[in-house]
Amino acid sequence: MADPAIYRPAPGSIPESPGVYRFRDPDGRVVYVGKAKSLRQRLNSYFADFAGLHPRTQTMLTTAASVDWTVVGNEVEALQLEYSWIKEFDPRFNVKYRDDKSYPFLAVTMGEDFPRVQVLRGAKRKGTRYFGPYSHAWAIRETVDLLLRVFPVRTCSAGVFKRAGQIGRPCLLGYIDKCSAPCVGRVTPEEHRALAEDFCDFMAGNTGRFVKRLEHEMRDAAAVEEYERAARLRDDVQALQRALEKQTVVLGDGTDCDVIALAEDPLEAAVQVFYVRGGRIRGQRGWVVDKVEETTPGELVEQFLLQMYGEATIPREILVPARPPDETALAELLSEQRGSRVDLRVPQRGDKKSLMETVERNAKESLAQHKLRRASDLTTRSRALQEIADALDLDQVPLRIECYDVSHIQGENVVASMVVFEDGLVRKSEYRRFSIRSGEGDVASIYEVICRRFKRYLEERVATGELDADDGVREPAVGTPIDPETGRPRKFAYPPNLVVVDGGPAQAAAARRALDELGVDDVAVCGLAKRLEEVWLPGDDQPVILPRSSEGLYLLQRVRDEAHRFAITYHRSKRSKPLRESALDQVPGLGPARRQALLRHFGSVKRLREASAEEIQAVPGIGPATAEAIVAALRGQSPSPAGQGS
């Protein structure tokens, strides 16, 4: 590992101009490419305070052995050069977007003498028009099958096309009128190309004129009593309408835009794009990215736009979830590539905002599915547990991990959660939640919840004879203790191998102190700080930094995030409970029906509070004793003895 101070450029040698810089490893390979409005300011930030940098940036600097730069004229040129170098060198520390699946496109090979319609994946080919991408290949084939009635374009391979021309007989599609059979000369090359161009126009969103033309021809055929032709044209119109129904209308006619949304966590991000052409969703595509360094949503958007539109078709408008840092320069670069103006917008209201929310939900689902696929692999889970054991210097892999998190708002309604992972998988039946009594901050709350959980654990062991109540002599346990009344495992009888707390060194120390006071010395403890994903061991001055690509760090993050989710869910339910309750709920014998009757009669709780017991008794079903109890409950008094006894 290199010392960044060794290859730091000499003071004053870095220009203040905009440019692009490269960090290289000892073998000369480019490990990171970046751009800057001021090269001096940006590069000095890497070398000024190494300890204050993000751990992932520190890793990049110690991996590198040299840095060089190229000065450019403006920010647009910097963006262009940065994209070119990232594409050329594929640096390991730059953000790389990878498809979460291989998406198929509908392609029309307009560069051939007889254009062909087909399904293609992978790299784009010159002279071919692409539509999509689509979620599934069968979705394309259904659409093509409907459109070939109206636009009978060739779909066969080069070999089939050549063989049909040699024998002078078309394939089956030619006989059923789903191909114009240019192979045998039924149409000229010009006529076939016109069909292909009409097919492309329809797929590009210019649909109205084709439907209107067919409807006009159908009426003309019916007027001259050519009913068979009119029936065929009617079926063609219906085929076009069914093809249009498969593409959801989301925006106004003529709207062409790409809608981009993000879902991220500290380690990964998922990107989803919906392609809207002519106001209809023509396809979608997704990517998943490892976040090598700490990046903002705007920076992720900028990197994504550069990589996505390096070779792809650029629409007039791109809707993004956050503004890129160099928005003006990026919009100018995209406009140059498109040949006309490109607008980058963050939708704030209306249909575009609603569509953005839909795309964001898809991004969140994509990230969740990616995590699920990653967590469900047995080999990956085993490697993650071993990496945790190695990093924390445990005697054995932590087959059972418990994680604790505290949730509150300014010290109100303080709750804690306990989630359990066994063999790297969630064990929701073992989840527990706690209402915190101390309310003296996160550290005290962690101490309280660990004490309460492990006191119950020790009580269960005493009850089952595993632990002697007098002298604390432990006996070997056989299996999981079973509750004789329910036949189920006792709630807190099964100890974890590792306790993870959401927080830094203070929280980890509080958990360790609680265990030590209870005499529990066979359970490891660590804290996971969310800001930098640092793992803290009790009593250590420095955190344990797991590698960025570590499956162990990924598993710890999943455990911590699940505890956070579970704690927030409980906190919200507890916080909203007073809003659902009223003083009437505490009145004995007053059920939901009579509460509703009271509110209907008086109109509000305020008027009911001002009413006398006699006025309340006027409501059907309310007797003297109940009326007295209602008055006492609403006015904060105790019911009179007479009222209680009557």
Image (spheres, rainbow, N blue to C red):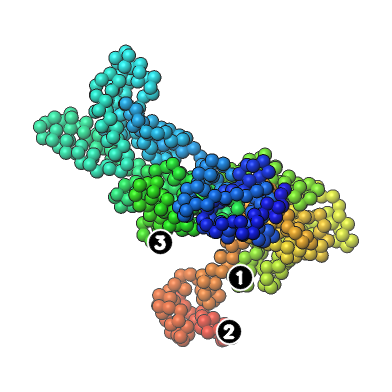
> Residue drawn 24% across and 34% down?
235
Q: Report the mark closest to the observer, 3 or 2.
A: 3
Q: CA distance from mark 3 to mark 2?
A: 53 Å
Residue 413: numbered disc: 1
Depth check, front residue: 127 or 408: 127
Q: Is residue 62 above or below residue 584?
A: above
Tell me if I can see residue 487 in this picture: no
Tell me if I can see residue 169 in this picture: yes
Image quadrant where residue 353 sits:
bottom left
Q: Is residue 241 above or below residue 185?
A: below
Residue that extends furthest to the front in the rendered view of this protein: 13
Q: Residue 87 at what x, y percent from top left? A: 52, 42
Residue labelled with disc 3:
348
Neighbour tally class for label 2: few under 14, some 14-19, many 20 plus, Cα within 10 Å: few
Depth check, front residue: 499 or 459: 499
> Residue drawn 61% across and 56% down?
13
Mark earlier in primary sequence (3, 2)? 3
Mark earlier in primary sequence (1, 3)? 3
Q: Residue 487 at what x, y percent from top left? A: 71, 51
Q: Report the mark closest to the observer, 2 or 1.
A: 1
> Residue drawn 13% across and 35% down?
220
Depth check, front residue: 156 or 628: 156
Q: Amino acid at mark 1?
A: Asn
Mark earlier in primary sequence (2, 1)? 1
Describe the element under mark 2 as helix, strand or loop: loop
Residue 638: numbered disc: 2
Neighbour tally class for label 1: few under 14, some 14-19, many 20 plus, Cα within 10 Å: some
